[in-house]
Image (cartoon, rainbow, N blue to C red):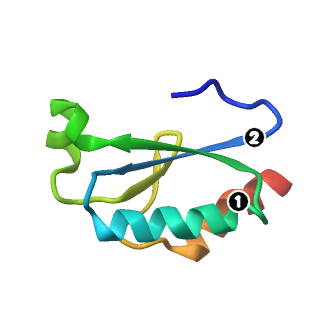
Amino acid sequence: MTAPDPDLPVLLTVYGREHCHLCQDMLATLQELKASYPFQLEVVDVDSDSDLQSRYGQRVPVLMAGNREICHYHLDLNAFGRIFQRIEK
């Protein structure tokens, strides 16, 4: 994990696992969105920690902003956009 970049106000975390096509799809779309939205992206493998395995089980990927779940399984572009609407206000 890298230190947060103070120039990018939003840190988003994707909880997923290796060999997960839904995880790869979400990450690919988020990488594309980085060209238009100022955010950092952290990826956490739920299989690296038994607590995370218990918490998320097969419900991956999960996109979080802080302690708030934005979406799971598929990227919800409306929910994603609302994160940045709050910042602009």
Q: Residue at x 74, y 31 (%)?
A: 5
Q: Crowding near pointer 2: few (<14 within 10 Å), some, many (20+)? A: few
Query: Label 1 vs label 2: CA separation?
Result: 13 Å
For label 2, the SS is loop
The answer to which quarter of the image holds residue 4 is: top right
Give percent across and percent down for residue 43.
45, 44
Question: Tag 1's secondary structure?
Answer: loop
Q: Which residue is mark 2?
A: 9
Q: Return the x and y of residue 33 as percentages of the image width and height.
A: 68, 66
Question: Badge 1: few (under 14), some or many (20 or more) residues near its Cα, within 10 Å?
Answer: few
33 shown above or below 78: above
What residue appears at the point 48 percent right and 71 percent down from the top-left corner? 75
Residue that protrudes farthest toward the front in the picture: 19
Res 71 → quadrant: bottom left
**Sequence-first tag of 1 and 2:** 2
| Residue 86 % position (x, y) | 74, 56
Residue 32, above or below 53: below
- Please, what is the three-letter code of the amino acid marked with disc 2? Pro
The answer to whether 12 appears left or right of 26 in the picture is right
Residue 38 visible in the displayed image? yes
Q: Is residue 89 visible?
A: no
State the residue position of label 1.
34
Please state if 51 lies on the left or on the right of 62 as rendered: left
Q: Quadrant of the C terminus?
A: bottom right
Residue drawn at x 73%, y 59% as measured from the top left: 84
Q: Amino acid at mark 1?
A: Lys
Compared with 32, 58 (above or below) is above
| Residue 50 horizontal/vertical position (percent) | 15, 32
Q: Evaluate if marks 1 and 2 touch, with contact meaning CB atoms under 8 Å apart.
A: no
Q: Quadrant of residue 35?
A: bottom right
